[in-house]
Amino acid sequence: MVKAAIVNVTGYAGVELARLLARHPNVEITEITGRSRAGERLPEVFPHLADIDLEIVAEIGESADVAFVALPHTAAAAVVPELLNNGARVVDISADFRLHDAASYESWYKTAHPAKDLLADAVYGLPELHAEDVKSSRIVANPGCYPTGAILALAPVANLTAPDVIVDSKSGVSGGGRSLTLTNHYSEVNENCHAYGLGGHRHLPEIEQELGELRRKADGRRPDLSITFVPHLVPMTRGILTTVYARLEQPLATRDIESMYRDFYKDAPFVRVVDQPPRTKQVWGSNMCLVHPTIDSRTGRLLVIAAIDNLVKGASGQAIQNMNVMFGLDETAGLSQTAIYP
């Protein structure tokens, strides 16, 4: 059994990790932290997790094989060195190790990187692209929720599109975290929809980094994509629906595009290419990403629709998928639950 610790179990990603890991056949949860609730037992804080009768502590000890870090950015990187020194491998759900370049991180997050010496050890944890690197890594940087949908939507054709690409994403409110702010207050969100981050969202450099690497791998002379990314908040709890608009550099029929996508993801258990535009309800509670590529017959433009649950494939489920790969387990272990519908 893999001994797992959850750092900050009281946030949405942390509590979702606990829910999923509790049913994992190869994992024992040994420690959970949450400084604001330290000394309480988990079922007192989250009654739906009554089967995980552990005390919430302030700090992780030395009993874990893997530590899932579900802290905000900068706070996460501050604890990772000690976790590594204690012998744990780390899956970090924050943004601290996603960007390869410390200067880029500091530009987007407006703070000095707390552990830039560890960036070279970190692997961007999108298993569909980097499974081999994830296997041997000590630090896996779990992708952001928006980048997961956007990258999976574009990866099969990243080297075939013209540079100018538009990514439009709509997210449920849980993506903003559990702390109350005005923008996720019920009366602000209900019966409302708004765009934000028009000046540049922090998830954009992840999308550019990963798709740029795919283009350079195919042809080092190719220019990077120029991505316009516009996220929206919509009045639902979970889910992200991403729509990508791009022009292909050579004309292709929808059947050709579909064939490319199915071939690209033929060995990816959590990406399914579907014949109809997916809906967020079709992935609610699951680790699946549904992808629908098509060609607009009138304009010749490529359209790709992708749907994920932002708390599962966009966070905690993907973190467990990465752990499975790291420890040589079945990639789908603990993640076989289907979507809850309606």
Image (cartoon, rainbow, N blue to C red):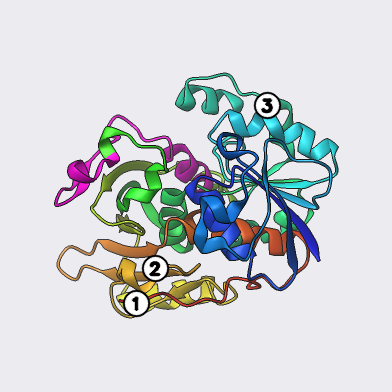
Q: Which mark is residue 341?
A: 1
Mark 3 vs mark 1, CA separation in Å: 43 Å
Q: Earlier in the sequence, mark 2 or mark 3?
A: 3
Q: Please, is residue 298 above or below residue 219 in the view?
A: below
| Foreground of the two, 103 or 261 | 103
Type of the residue with mark 3: Lys
**Magenta residues, start to end:** 184-212
Type of the residue with mark 1: Tyr
Q: Please, is residue 151 above or below residue 60 in the view?
A: below
Mark 2 vs mark 3, CA separation in Å: 35 Å
Q: Where is mark 3, residue-wise?
A: 116
Report helix, strand or loop for mark 3: helix
| Residue pictured at 26% horizontal, 46% vertical | 232
Residue 186 vs residue 332: left or right?
Answer: left
Q: Where is mark 2, residue-wise?
A: 284
Can you say which quadrant of the picture contains the C terminus?
bottom left
Task: State yes or no: discs 2 and 1 in contact (Cβ < 8 Å).
Answer: yes
Image spot of residue 329 (x, y percent): 75, 70
Residue 19 vs residue 204: left or right?
Answer: right
